[in-house]
């Protein structure tokens, strides 16, 4: 059986797909390297309507070709041209809330709204023999009022157990595909033998974002049941899960929100850790903030800078020495406090989806030979464990009972 299959992408209008996934496919050749053909799925009833939608979107964004908008526009134009020429197929996959699947032999990538990820996964798994990439989070863990509710998580876990054998199910948790994180994963055994076990984890993720952006407003709102823990938290707790770590006690969580938002846009969580790589008293702290350029109070009137770092402290029991390794997601580096820089074993692309699609394809090849192998690092099972941690945070420290206004600290 030929290894290459078609790739079907659900929700071709997703901003994140346009910014990261489609450049990997169109500009870096993912489709030709790993897949035969590409089909995109949307709510539009026909290819012609999809092209009209793209023409409309292109006209609205043209003239704003900066940063993310530039990448969106380029992907929209590439996709429209390929739909026009027939090089990319089109399929209407959702009508009146019902999800329909194209015929054929293909793999699937899900970029729909968070609230229907679970339904798409369910339909694809039940269809059978479809390997899946799903953009994070796999499921949304709150109800319409943003209270913790794990029914969908339990449903996903049951689906994976029932239908997931022999399939590659990968969470497109793109922080784990960044150069700094891969360097950490690839050298963890070396770090542990050299520096000891992990005593402490601290993450400081301060991310500028436009508070008026439609994408951000859709991402962080009660309507879509997604706050900052389900946006950034799945990345940061996922790094712990992906090295077989486990949060066994949540000691505290506090939240703030930016004006105009009804969910947390700032979160700080403290917890205890356990696992093979951790000391008995290992602790962690994760601090996440969006809109830092909009903060009303800035210390010493200095401009707050973007920061995306994950700091791991190792402890050698014999020498009592502590050594930190700092993962800088912005710079793509993993450097220890004694000056050693760790590198990934393989060349890593600056576009995380190059690595994600590559791992997807390689895992499929391994699993074809042995169904018990070929599980990706960010497999659904690992991601479910990450989501359980976030569910417990929401459950033990509910957002609605512990929410300050506009970062009033």
Image (cartoon, rainbow, N blue to C red):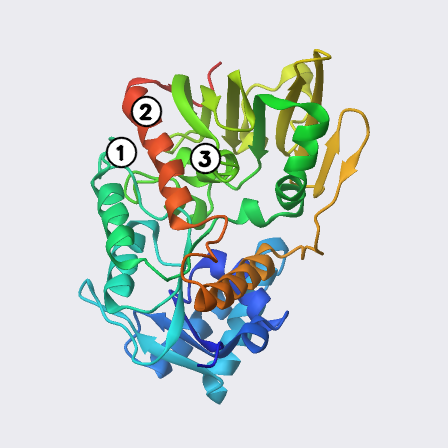
Along the line of sight, which residue is nearer the eye, 212 or 335?
Answer: 335
Q: Residue 189 at what x, y percent from top left?
A: 65, 36
Give the label, 1 or 3, closer to the camera.
3
| Residue wearing tag 3 | 233
Residue drawn 58% across and 31% down? Answer: 206
Dot 3 alpha-carbon crowd within 10 angstroms: few under 14, some 14 to 19, many 20 or more: many
Residue behind mark 2: 399
Front-most of residues 132 and 63: 132
Q: Quadrant of residue 133?
A: bottom left
Please state the horizontal and vertical placement of residue 328, each as a whole percent of the image.
68, 36
Q: Is 404 placed above or below 22 here?
A: above
Front: mark 2 or 3 = 3
Which tag, 1 or 2, sits closer to the chain's start? 1
**Relative to 104, 288 lies left or right:** right
Question: Label 1 belongs to which residue?
Answer: 146
Residue 346, picture quadrant = bottom right
């Amino acid at each position: 059986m030929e290894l290459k299959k078609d790739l079907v992408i659900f929700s071709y209008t997703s901003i994140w797909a346009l910014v990261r996934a489609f450049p990997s496919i169109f500009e870096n050749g993912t489709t030709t390297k790993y897949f035969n053909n590409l089909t995109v799925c949307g709510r539009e009833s026909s290819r012609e309507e999809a092209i009209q939608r793209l023409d409309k979107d292109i006209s609205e964004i043209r003239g704003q070709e900066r940063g993310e908008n530039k990448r969106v526009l380029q992907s929209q134009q590439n996709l429209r041209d390929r739909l026009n020429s027939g090089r990319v197929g089109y399929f209407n996959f959702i009508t009146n809330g019902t999800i329909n699947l194209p015929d054929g032999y293909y793999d699937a990538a899900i970029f729909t709204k968070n609230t229907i990820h679970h339904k798409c996964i369910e339909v694809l798994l039940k269809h059978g023999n479809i390997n899946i990439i799903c953009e994070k989070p796999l499921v949304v863990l709150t109800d319409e009022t943003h209270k913790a509710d794990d029914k969908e998580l339990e449903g996903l876990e049951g689906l994976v157990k029932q239908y997931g054998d022999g399939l590659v199910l990968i969470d497109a948790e793109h922080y784990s595909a960044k150069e700094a994180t891969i360097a950490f994963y690839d050298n963890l055994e070396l770090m542990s033998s050299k520096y000891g076990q992990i005593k402490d984890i601290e993450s400081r993720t301060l991310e500028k974002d436009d508070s008026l952006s439609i994408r951000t407003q859709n991402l962080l709102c009660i309507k879509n049941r997604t706050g900052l823990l389900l946006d950034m938290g799945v990345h940061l707790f996922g790094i712990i899960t992906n090295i077989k770590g486990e949060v066994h006690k949540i000691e505290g969580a506090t939240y703030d929100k930016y004006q105009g938002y009804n969910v947390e846009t700032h979160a700080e969580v403290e917890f205890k850790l356990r696992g093979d790589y951790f000391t008995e008293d290992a602790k962690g702290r994760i601090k996440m903030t969006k809109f830092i350029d909009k903060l009303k109070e800035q210390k010493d009137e200095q401009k707050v800078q973007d920061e995306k770092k994950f700091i791991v402290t190792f402890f050698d029991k014999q020498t009592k020495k502590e050594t930190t390794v700092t993962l800088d997601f912005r710079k793509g580096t993993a450097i220890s406090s004694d000056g050693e820089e760790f590198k990934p074993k393989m060349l890593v692309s600056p576009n995380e989806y190059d690595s994600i699609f590559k791992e997807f394809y390689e895992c499929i090849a391994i699993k074809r030979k042995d169904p018990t192998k070929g599980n990706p690092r960010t497999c659904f099972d690992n991601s479910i464990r990450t989501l359980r941690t976030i569910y417990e945070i929401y459950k033990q420290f509910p957002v609605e009972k512990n929410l300050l206004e506009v970062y009033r600290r």
